[in-house]
Amino acid sequence: MDEFAVKIKMGARLSLDELVTLYNCPVSQLAALATSKREQQNGKKVFFNRNIHLEPTNICVNDCVFCSYRRNEGEAGSWDYGIDELLAQCRRHAGTGVTEVHIVGGVHPRRDVHDYAGLLRAVKQALPQVHIKAFTAIEIDYMIKKAGMSLTDGLALLKQSGLDAIPGGGAEIFDEQVRRRLCPKKGPAGIWLRVHETAHTLGVRTNATMLFGHVETLEHRLQHLLQLRELQDRTGGFDAFIPLKYKSENNALGDLGEVSAVETLRMIAISRLALDNIPHIKAYWPMLGKAVMQMALLFGADDVDGTINDTTKIYSMAGAEEQHPCLGVDELCRLVRDAGFVPVERDTFYRELQVRPFGQ
């Protein structure tokens, strides 16, 4: 462990074999190494923002076996909001200090990039002060192809219409055999990687994710991280990585159960150590719950996402502990301070803002 500590302090890059060794070391030592790395990069700061989610539809052409969210058109539990309904959701949060609108949903069979460009323009008009982080790479690929446009031209249209950043969803696991079992209709991992690389060349910042804790192996997880590290070496366009734990309720993989909190914390720590070129590791509290989120800050995470304001159903429909995810700024800051860290409000691009009382 002393050798690893020296390598990490010197900023040396860790190999696949070294990451395997570290993942399996005593959990307290792994936590200490990950904490050392995150403090090199971000000190004691823990970032959050004031955000809301818009989920235009859960109707989806894909049929991923891990998904508890997706419905067919007309099926019970499906929704498909029009622009007016989505704008009404935005206006309910006007004046609350929200700085980001996060838009993701199902891959709707009848929507193309022009439909979503119109939505972006409408949201910007309703909430001109916000940044919009919108659409997974899988959504973007489908909507652009449906319009018969090139990926570059389609992304440029979205950017011109108000797209500020792209979230990391839809990556799942990059290994192709695993993808064929989990999400065969989504196609190869190259689609996700190509969308993000193209976005980076256009100056659009993005995040990255990995869905873990289902049928994959440790090597699949680590190879996924190394592919992200390689892309970041080329483009520098990722701001944050979010390890997403598979949740087992209401989907076809439910018999697998879920990985433990300790394994989740190991995954967060190894992500911090592997992704030496991605500045932030996010502990997504609606997935983890508040207590595990606090522990994740001791395992290398330096971001906890945002206030959410009970605007997302993706994890609650899969049995997340937080069924109505909403955190006021005061409570979020208290949770961070109680874990021994300094809460820092940020915008979408990690520019630091002055922490204000909720509603300002």
Image (tube, rainbow, N blue to C red):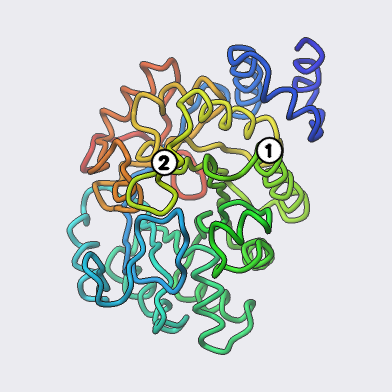
Identify which residue is drawn at 27% across, 76% down. 83
What secondary structure is marked by label 2? strand
Give the residue at x 51% y 30%.
264
Nearer-the-camera pick, 35 or 146: 146
Residue 128 lies in quadrant: bottom left
Number of residue marks: 2
For the point 44% across and 41% down, which residue is it? Answer: 346
Q: Amino acid at mark 2?
A: Asp
Q: Quadrant of residue 78?
A: bottom left
- Residue placed under numbered mark 1 in the picture: 275
Q: Is residue 302 above or below residue 98?
A: above
Q: Find residue 118 and report its horizontal and vertical position in percent.
A: 38, 80
> x, y (%) of residue 337?
38, 19
Q: Is residue 228 left or right of residue 211?
A: right
Looking at the rendered structure, the secondary structure element under dot 1 is: loop
Percent position (x, y) of residue 233?
Answer: 77, 49
For the residue marked with disc 1, what is the amino acid? Leu
Rounded to the nearest whole Å, what is the CA distance between mark 1 and mark 2?
18 Å
> Residue 45: x percent and y percent?
50, 26
Q: Which mark is residue 189?
A: none
Residue tagged by mark 2?
305
Could you classify mark 1 by the number of other residues whose Cα lies within 10 Å: few (under 14), some (14-19), or many (20 or more)?
many
Q: In what quadrant of the picture does the C terminus appear?
A: top left
